[in-house]
Amino acid sequence: MLRSLIDAFKVPELRKKILFTLAILALYRLGAYIPVPGIPFNEFATSFANSGASMAMLDLFTGGALSNFSVFSLGIMPYITASIIMQLMQGVIPSLGNMAREGEAGRRKITQITRYLTLALGLINAIGYLLLFKSSAYGVVFSSEVPEILTDFLVVFTLVAGTGFIMWMGELITQRGVGNGMSLIIFVSIVSRVPSAIFSSINTTSDSGMGIALTILILAVVLVCIPAIIYVERAQRRIPVNYAKRVQGRKMMGGQSTYIPFKVNSAGVIPIIFASCIIYFPAQLAAIFNVGWLTAAADAASAGWVNWILTVLLIVFFAYFYTSMVFNPSETSDNLRKQGGFIPGVRPGTNTEQYIKNVLKRVTLPGGIFIAVIAVLPTIIFYFTGNELVQAFGGTSILIMIGVALDTMNKVESQLKMYNYEGFFK
């Protein structure tokens, strides 16, 4: 691992990409501590500390930016919500579906629509947060020296601009850095809460020795779970494929054997991110409308048995949904037939398509259940213990961190192999 990192910095192009990515992520973390102009910071921080579970979870995915009422308070969630909407609409609106199949030009159009939708959702969220924090629950009072309507406009504009800036930074990392920019921003937001969670865990009990022992135990369990999670993340179901021999000119073509790899968790962390976004959507609505019953519903969906059941069901659903979006059995079967390939014991055409569908169903279910269980179990433990380290290293957090780390390492490894260096994975 250390040797691979050293090799990565030996390649000038890769070194620039890594340093550029780290610089953008550092800029993002700096923005999480710059408060919105006009906010009475101390009074707001005291009020936010007593907020419900829904706001605490929203704050986790913003890396503490929401509790600071910073320029990045909305975090990456508006963009993720917009991306989910666009993914769903591609299967409902034929014109969007056709646009997605147009190649690079179509993807650019969809990306542009996603950007506009992100800003629209950011505007709605910003107005909602402003109304919520000015309510009696938080009691934010602006200075009377400036007209209140002007301060309101400044707050909303700053929050929406912050969302646009985060989106821009994420796209910059994807285009000019290493890894997926949006995933890395979520990764950094989660990791940034770990140090404070460790200190909080140590001070959970009055006996500091007991707190230290409990913290070490939690960290040890996490370290033991990481290899098991990585094993499942990289596990594959390989379908053998043979290619018939054929004569092309004076050469004999084909005759070789290969396989089609189906990952057990082919969707990666996407189902968790999508499920989290859906579950926290009531919290966003509660922030916008500030209605008692809606706030109660948002708190119930953010913690407790309702949250656990919804998380499992949504993760399994999105595991199937995302797999069906990125893998087309009909297209795979058709390509095999055109290239003279076949699965041993399965007729080409419809039978091959059905066989691939059945394999996908059988492989996706255990993968979806696995990540759902990993996501929910630490949440249950946190519910009964209240230990912040369990929440910081919760199933959702650790799966996102491992998934993003593996994806980034794979991209760095592919770059290293272009320059004849060994990668991270032997």
Image (cartoon, grey):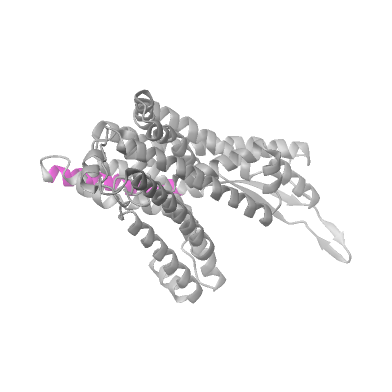
Instruction: Report x, y in % for residue 172.
Output: 50, 61
Indicate the position of residue 250 as horizontal and vertical percent values.
Answer: 88, 66
User: Would residue 394 be seen by someone viewing this image from the given angle?
Assistant: no
- Whole-percent x and y of residue 238? 61, 47
Prevailing secondary structure of the magenta residues: helix
Q: What residue do we see at 80% from left, 52% from top?
A: 244
Is 136 in front, or is 33? 136
Q: In percent of the image, x 30 and y 55: which residue is there?
A: 33
Residue 401's place in the image compared with 277, above or below, is below
Res 135 quadrant in image: top left
* Image coordinates for residue 401, horizontal then vertical, percent: 40, 50
Q: Is residue 222 above or below residue 412?
A: above
Query: Which quarter of the figure has residue 327?
Result: top right
Magenta highlight on residue 229:
yes
For residue 184, side relative to residue 52 (left or right): right
**Image position of 257 (left or right of 42):** right
- Seen from the viewer's position, the closer of residues 425 and 391 is 391
Per the rendered image, the range of residues in magenta is: 209-230
